[in-house]
Amino acid sequence: MKIIVLGAGVVGVASAWYLAAAGHEVTVIERRDAAALETSFANGGQICAGHAEPWAKPAVVPKILSWLGREDAPLLFRPRASWAQWAWGLRFLYECLPGHFERHSRTLAGLAGYSLECLRALRAELGLRYDHLERGILQFATNQRDFDAMARHAEATQQEIKSASECLAIEPALRHSNDPVVGGVYNPNDESGDAYRFTQELARVAAARGVVFRFGAAIEAIEAARGAVDAIRLRGAQRATADAYVVSIGSYSPLLLAPLGVRIPVYPLKGYSITLPLGPAELAAAPTVSLTDEAFKIVISRLGNRLRAAGTAELTGYDTTVNATRCAAIARRIRDLFPALGGVTTVENWTGLRPATPNNVPVIGKTRFRNLYLNTGHGTLGWTLACGSGAVLGDLISGRRPQVAFPFT
């Protein structure tokens, strides 16, 4: 079949790759001038198959109350006259109820584990290079309450609980933290890497194997009639047609789908990251194991001679301006954890809109239009779930049964 994939982020490019591998003729349409220039550009770098967890969990509710009014809060709600925002927020609170977190964690774990297998197979087959490290992910706590909650969940999911001394042995760079580590959970099979470089590399190989990329093509609407999509209308009165269509444009997916009457529970969750270039002196002091700071909801990854720290979530609509206060809060935390990096004065600030569902479970599969498919809503786990999501979408469109249990639409 001829298939058009809308969006060239990490999820869209992975979808295009697996569809082409299944024998389809694939075109990717992207409004930017290259792949992975939006949400996939500077994320936290973690591939966290071992703890692919939703943000919505019982322990986060009392924290939300303490974060109210704080400009540097890990989760910040900026009220707008938007029903979509309020509906998403209320559903998020509902998903924090006991039992929901555990159920959604199991769902995500299955897809995340499969996705990691797909990523490793792709890397071996294509020789992709993207500053990846296979040193696991250490989720650490700097207060006893967070550690106790982490330990309870780790026991239920058979993850490795580590004492403070064991955490410091895994990542010695934390020994000098001004906020001492009290314990953590370690997933040795997890990885880290640069999602932007991966997506660029995969797009390059895909193009060499026949996938067509139409960059700089702004999508105006999906034209549909009689239960099927007829074409994609582009800016400049252009139309693109195919046998099937995949919507994978992240946070903008619900806006494109709404005129068709297709509703999905996706809302932009604005996240921030900082990237620190590391000189010879800083390389020895910076961590090499990917980290998750439970107290501040920050993830930290070493990407070659750079250190990436990302986190915070802001419900503020489609605003993409960089809030310097929130980036500065991440920078302060990094210098608190790693005082030897205090001399790094050059910091690259970035923000992006994560396409989040309230329970973090993405929307993958078919719509009520017989030739329109979705692969979006991955939230904070787009990099983790990208390859697996692309593989299962390729199976679904090709009429094959996916190799992982998941609530596909």
Image (cartoon, helix red, strand yellow):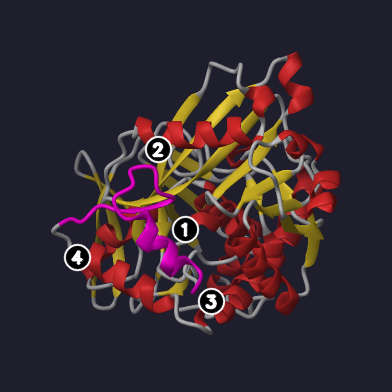
Q: Which type of secondary structure does the marked residue at label 3 adopt? A: helix
Most extreme residue toward the bottom is 99
What is the count of numbered marks?
Answer: 4
Q: Which residue is mark 4?
A: 259
Q: Which residues fall within the magenta stretch?
A: 58-80
Which mark is in front, 3 or 1? 3
Going from N to C along the chain, the mark reached first, 4 or 1, is 4
Which mark is in front, 3 or 4? 3
Q: Which type of secondary structure does the marked residue at label 4 adopt? A: helix
Measuring from the top left, give residue 49's x and y in whole percent: 69, 61
Question: How far is the residue under mark 4 from the one under mark 1?
Answer: 23 Å
Q: Are marks 4 and 2 in contact (CB under 8 Å)?
A: no
Question: How far is the residue under mark 1 from the one under mark 2?
Answer: 19 Å
Q: Which type of secondary structure does the marked residue at label 2 adopt? A: helix
Q: Which type of secondary structure does the marked residue at label 1 adopt? A: helix
Label 1 Cα crowd, 10 Å radius (few <14 / some 14-19 / many 20+): many
